[in-house]
Each structure stands twice: as C-alpha cells, then as structure tokens.
Image (cartoon, helix red, strand yellow):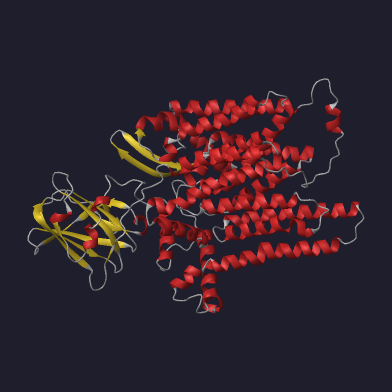
Amino acid sequence: MQQIISTLRGYLEQVQDKTTPAVIFPIVAILYIILFFRYYRKISMPLAGTSEWIDQRMDNTKLTLITTRYPMKKEDVAPIIVITAAFSFLAFFRLGNTTAPQSFFRFSADTPTIVIELSDPQEIKTIMFYSGLGSGHYKLEFSEDGVTWREQKNPLTQNPDDTPTHAMDQSNSHLFKWRYAVLNDDNPVVNYIRLTASHVDMELGELALYGFNGALIQHYQIICPDAPQLFDEQGLIPERPTYMNSMYFDEIFHGRAGFEYLRNVYPYETTHPPLGKGIISASIFLFGMTPFGWRFIGAAFGTVMLTVLYILIKNMFGKTSVAVCGTLLLGFDCMRFTQTRIATIDTYGVFFILLAYFFMYRHITSDAGAPFRKSILPLALSGLAFGVGCASKWIVIYSGLGLAVLYVIRIFAVFKRYKEVEREDFGGYLARALSFAALFFIIIPAVIYCLSYIPYGVASGMTVKGGMLWDVKYYDIIWKNQVSMLNYHGLLTSQHPYSSMWWQWILDARPILYVNYYAGDLRSCFGAFGNPIVWWGGFIAMIVMAGRVAKRHDGKALFILIGYLSQLLPWLAISRTVFIYHYFASTLFLVLAISHMYNSIIERGRGRWKQAVYGYTSAAGVAFATLYPALSGIYVPRWYFTNIARWIPAAWPF
C-alpha cells in the first residue's frame, strides 16, 4: 500500500507540470461513468408504491449456477455478421505489408565476407538493410581502390571499452526489420563496399544504398556476384522503416519462432509453450514471411473472439440488445484491438480462456437432473480449449482455477438435486464427474502440451515416423524447457520503462508504447492499454457483481466474478516484471460484468433503458474513435498526442 501511495504521489507531482488539454477526456469519461452507475442504482431500488423492498429482504433464493440458458435466434444472425465484418475491416486495415524480402544471403565459414562494387564512384550517404535469421554484427568498410579500406563505426554508441560499436548491428532484437546503418560523417567517394559477418549463418535479405544526392543507387549500377540476393528485390525497399514493413516488440521472438518452425530451426525464443507460435507459423505458411503473414492469424482470432463472446452473452441473458452492446464493448476495447494485431501469443491464450469459459457455462447450466452424458460434450470442449490454451501460454493455467471452482459448484448443485428427489446413485455420478474432469482437464491437456513440442524435436533431428513421441530424449527436451521457463519467469525482475503493477492495470495507468516513428511534423505510434470506458466502468461493475453475489445470490454474477478473480489474483503474488497486457484476459469479464448490468437495466428500466445501455456503448465507441490514431499507427500531427491522446499526463507515454 505504501508503494501505491508513493507512486500516486509521484504521478500527481508530474501531472502538475504536464497537464494538457487531453485531461478533459478522462474527466468527461469519469462523469459519464458516474451518471451510468447512478442510473443503475436508481433502477435497482425497490419501485415506489410496491412491496419489492419486502420481497428483497425476505428473498431466501439459494445460490446456484444452474440457470436458464437462452438459445441463439434468427435475429442474432445479422448483428453477428455486421459486427464481424466491421471489426474484421478494422483489424486488417493497414495490418502490415503483404510483401517483404524473401531471398536471403547466408554468410558462412566459406563466405564470411562479400565485396560490392559500384559501376560509378559514389559518396554513400545512407544504407538501409533488412536482416533475416542469425545475430551478430557486420564490419562495414568503404574503399576507393579495393585495396585500402576504411571501416565505418557507429559514432552514437560505445562498447564497454569506450570504442565505437559497429555501424550495422543485427542483434536478436533487430531481426526482420528495415534498419539504417550509422555512417561516419566524412565519407569520401567510394567504389567498393565490403561486409564481413561476425558469425556464420547470419542472413541478410536486402540492401538499399543511397548516394550523395539521396537517391537510391539502382541495382544495375551494383556488381555483387557473390551475394545477388542482396539486390534482387529492390522494388520492396520502403520509404522508411515502419511497423508496416518491420517487426516490432515481441514479434521479434514469437513471429520469428513461427518462421523457425517452418524451417525446422530450433527456436531462439523458448520462454513460452510452443503452440501459440505454431499457430503463427500456420499464418506465415499461408501468407509468407511478411508483416501481414505473421500478423494475420492473430487479427483473425481477435475477430472470432467477438463472435464467441456474443453467443456467450446471448446464452447468459437472452437479449439480443445486451449481446450486441456487450460484444461492441469488447470490440471497442483498445487492448483487444492492439494486442490482436501484433504477432505475439497473448491473443491465443485469451481466446482459449474465453472458449473454455463459454463451454463451461454451457456445461454448468445444463439440467442437473439429466444423465451425465447429456452434458459431457461442452465439458469436453471446455477441457480441449483449456489444453490448447495452456500449450499456447501459461496464463491459461490461471483459468483452470476458475473452471475448477465452477465445476465443483456444479457438482454440489447436482448433489442437492439428487437429495431433493431422493436419488441414491450420486456416488456413481461423482465418480463419472471426477473421472471425466481428470480426462478432459489433465490427461488430454497434457497430451496436447507434449505434442506441441514436435517442432522442437524435429529441429533436434527427430521425426514422428522415427519414433520421436516414444523417445526419452524428446521428453527430456520438454522437461528441460519447463525448468528453463520457470527459471526465466521466476527471475525476470529487471527494470523496464513500461512495466507496471496490477493496480495500475485496473486504473489503466501504465500503457506500453510499442511503436514510435516521426516524419517531420507527423508522428506514428501506438501502444497497449484499455478503453477507459470499458476498464474503469468494468471494474466498478465487478464490484457490483460481488454485491449481487452477496446480497442476491446471483449465479451469473458469481460466474463472472470467479472468471475475473482467477485471471487477476495470481498476478498479485507474482514478483516478476509484468506488463499491462497481462490484464488482457481480465477484460473479458469486465465486459461480461457491464453486460450483466445492461441486462438488469433493460429488465427494470421500463422502457427508459435505451439511453443508458446504448449511450454507454456509444461512449466506449467514441473513446475508441478518439484514441484510434494512438492504436493504429497512422501518421497524424504531433499535437494530437499531446492534446488528445494523453488522457493521463505523465503516465500515458504519448
């Protein structure tokens, strides 16, 4: 608590110096949220002139999760199609280029150096390059006669011994990016350029050479017989590096791993389970190793996520208006939009968490008196989603806690039903329930998890036909990776400028800035953070859910509360460096909590609910539209970020 108070005090001190016109937006948002919840409280009170207050005090309803499950209807088809089409357009619009260099020259022990000859002498002003796999640096040298060479050094950075670093760096954080070499200021006119790789198997995709007048030196003016791949795709050279043509943030690990799977290369990134990166590899297989290719599947999952949520909300509340507005809230959430458009694995973890809870809801709302086999299919699908999710990212394991609690509550509900009808075969039901739970949530997920490591085995020289799955070496690879992951996440305590605490997630107070480019008076940037209307209002709605569980024994509110707490509470005990995108899964339940309130407002608003429900959803849409340039990376004037996008001064890094 002392740390929270200290941090807030620091924020307030910085805000005094950095207050901008943008602060009017959060003020308006907070006022609107207050009005919405005041209206909810008003319509929740007993109606005047009725005996509702007596009924509420004398209500002895038992807490149960077995409630009515409403079916989808024909009128739900059109909203799903419209929502899917609209958010698909937003997801894929300027997602990334569909082209990128595909041919790479690989430096080797036999060819560690290449020489590039220019047909005419040139004063090289700029070199832009696109790297592939392999990390290290290149020794870049210029020469007038091919005999005397002058090495280029980066004057902006220093090695530990105070010597300049190399002009062309290809570290692991810079792969599959267009980057500039940093050249000396006093370059003479040269005829030859020499590149020497620091390590074998480093791959270079394309070089762009710019002469003294800033014009691109054409490929026919370049002679490079040893490495023709460096100049065979000159038509793909961009005007400048941007997120549209280069990897950013953890794409350099997860998108790269997807490509390595396809090439049977043992992945560099082994800090997360393999399946999420395997999903990315399928996208790359379909669309190529391009920005669009490594991002497509995440954007698709982010759109399908909305359809799943729509069906869940409709199953829970039975109202098309609630399903539409609740789904739009998630569609308008900034975190969902940004996080599903980046080639990282968080999207798949969150998607399968949603899917697991969706099928669990269908299981626990089935008739408690029906034979167990009647509810086994949704239970099996919930376990399957849980298993696939765990093999994608460990955050899904947290959902297992919530799913287990819901399942146990369901078993108790069935036990009570058996007692009411005086059935004596509950022991048989319990044995089947526990057996199938072990099968669907332990055994099958364990099998899926082990199978997800097939790319690791193949990269190690094993094959499935050759008995990989029965080879002790294969399971040794899996075991060692689990130990490595535990050590990595347990020891990840290094400081990061965008790291945050769990309470900052709730406040939406520490976004991550993924991209930041400048072009004159224009700026392109975006980051990961939540829609304040959804996140701030959603947290208050979660408090309302807790109240409904305590006072009204509301089973649907309990379902939502358990899901939320299972995704948030584990982070309170984790000491590793964490980021705001770890709250992504929790936003699913924030939306469900607001949807629950929508349902209550419609039922008790007596014809006056539209302004509240449609108004709140529209407010989320307006906030999303207002922040869209800070989510999409489109170039806008710099004043936009200072005067509009920086809702929380000194905290939002725009």
Q: Position of residue 607 (x, y in %)?
A: 70, 24
Residue 165 sits in quarter: bottom left
| Corner quadrant of residue 633 | top left
* Residue drawn at the location 70% of the way across and 43% of the way down: 71
Decide if residue 203 is on the left or right side of residue 481: left
Quadrant location of the C terminus in the rendered image: top left
Vertical comparison of 395 with 648: above or below:
below
Q: Nearer the viewer, residue 416 or 327?
A: 327
> Is residue 118 visible in this depiction of the protein?
yes
Outermost residue, front direction?
A: 74
Q: Position of residue 555 (x, y in %)?
A: 75, 43
Residue lying farthest to the right in this orientation: 422
Image check: 212 left or right of 378? left
Q: Is 558 left, or right, of 637 in this rendering?
A: right
Quarter of the N terminus within the rendering: top right
The residue positioned 52% from the left and 61% from the top of the image is 275
Q: Position of residue 265 (x, y in %)?
A: 40, 68
Tell which of 626 and 647 is nearer to you.
Answer: 626
